[in-house]
Image (cartoon, rainbow, N blue to C red):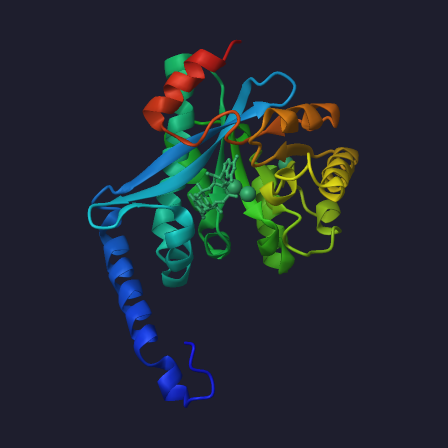
Amino acid sequence: AKNKGKSAFAVFAPEMTEVSHERLQMESLMRRALEQQEFELYFQPIVRTETGQMAFAEALLRWNNPSLGMVMPDRFIPLAEETGLIMPIGEWVLKESCKAAMRWRTETGHRIGISVNVSPRQFRDPDFVQTVMQALEQSGLEPDQLELEITERLILDNTIETADILRELDQSGIRLSVDDFGTGYSALSYLKSYPFDTLKIDKSFVQDVMTEHDDASLVRAIINMAHSLGLRVIAEGVEEEAQTHFLKTEGCDYSQGYFYSRPLPAADFDTWLSSNHRV
Ligand code: C2E
Ligand code: CA
Ligand code: CA
Ligand code: CA
């Protein structure tokens, strides 16, 4: 709406209708996407910085729709959150992720953990913990092979329920990581009081470590702080070799990014796994 100063009616006129039409269309397509089997998981390797060997993988959701084409998660996850469709979709992601990790184990003999993104609304679902446990039971995957990625923003509204759920998941042996660390403008005290295992440094910091002195200092400080709290650190968005040298020098435990591999469809991931992984 560019026509500021006109009446509220004029401001909301044609563009809004178009946007909400698109939304409605997308929503109705999304409602059928699960049963039409349009969702697909891609997997991105997370490697040990020191050796470049795969340690685990992050599951990243894709939506292949006949009329929309391949839809990236930033385009549909927010709408899935708003409509509540994230519940069944998120459940599917959890189950498929655990199955995939179990399949890597039985087919290739490699014990590769899987990291799954959890959205705030999903996390607040009273059945969430049960859904996670079911995904583990049905696949046979051990709890310490599953890591749940929770954004800093979710932790911000630190309610008693959030703390309880995190504790319950932690006690069952599942790993917990803070995603997008550094972007949530939150006090750091939660790191002390919540049972996190891993901290993922947001790619916006990693991207400029070679050119921006401040970003390098920040990344160094985050790594040191995390280690002194007993957390493992993953650097996201590693695209260049120079960054890997920096991260190695600074003792960053794990790295993830296009330099190592883009997120891959299951079949390509299997190929990557068998060529990269030496036991
Ligand atoms: P995220 O959790 O921060 O995931 C990392 C994103 O960075 C992914 O984008 C990944 O493809 C991208 N990426 C990886 N390496 C690099 C790199 O070297 N450079 C750059 N520029 N980007 C890199 P993607 O797959 O488009 O996912 C976007 C976001 O959508 C994710 O951000 C996550 O918040 C959300 N998402 C993805 N899958 C799921 C899911 O199953 N459930 C939920 N709730 N959210 C998901
Ligand atoms: Ca993530
Ligand atoms: Ca833990
Ligand atoms: Ca992230």
Q: Residue furthest bottom?
A: 7
Relative placement, left or right, of 23 versus 274 is left
Residue 19 percent across, percent down from the top left: 32, 68
Q: Nearer the viewer, residue 73 or 246?
A: 246
Is residue 237 visible in the rendered image? The answer is: yes
* Quadrant location, the N terminus: bottom left
Relative placement, left or right, of 171 versus 114 is right
Q: Nearer the viewer, residue 121 or 166?
A: 121
Give the total number of marks visible in the rendering: 0
Residue 129 percent across, percent down from the top left: 49, 46
Above-or-below relation of 156 to 203: below
Is residue 158 visible in the rendered image? The answer is: no
Splitting the image into 4 quarters, where does residue 167 fall?
A: top right
Residue located at (73% from left, 55% from top):
187
Residue 120 percent across, percent down from the top left: 51, 55
Relative placement, left or right, of 130 versus 156 is left
Residue located at (40% from left, 47% from top):
73
Above-or-below relation of 142 to 196: above
Question: Ligand 3 sits in which quadrant?
Answer: top right
Residue 48 percent across, percent down from the top left: 60, 22
Above-or-below relation of 150 to 227: below
Q: Residue furthest top?
A: 279
Residue located at (63% from left, 23% from top):
49
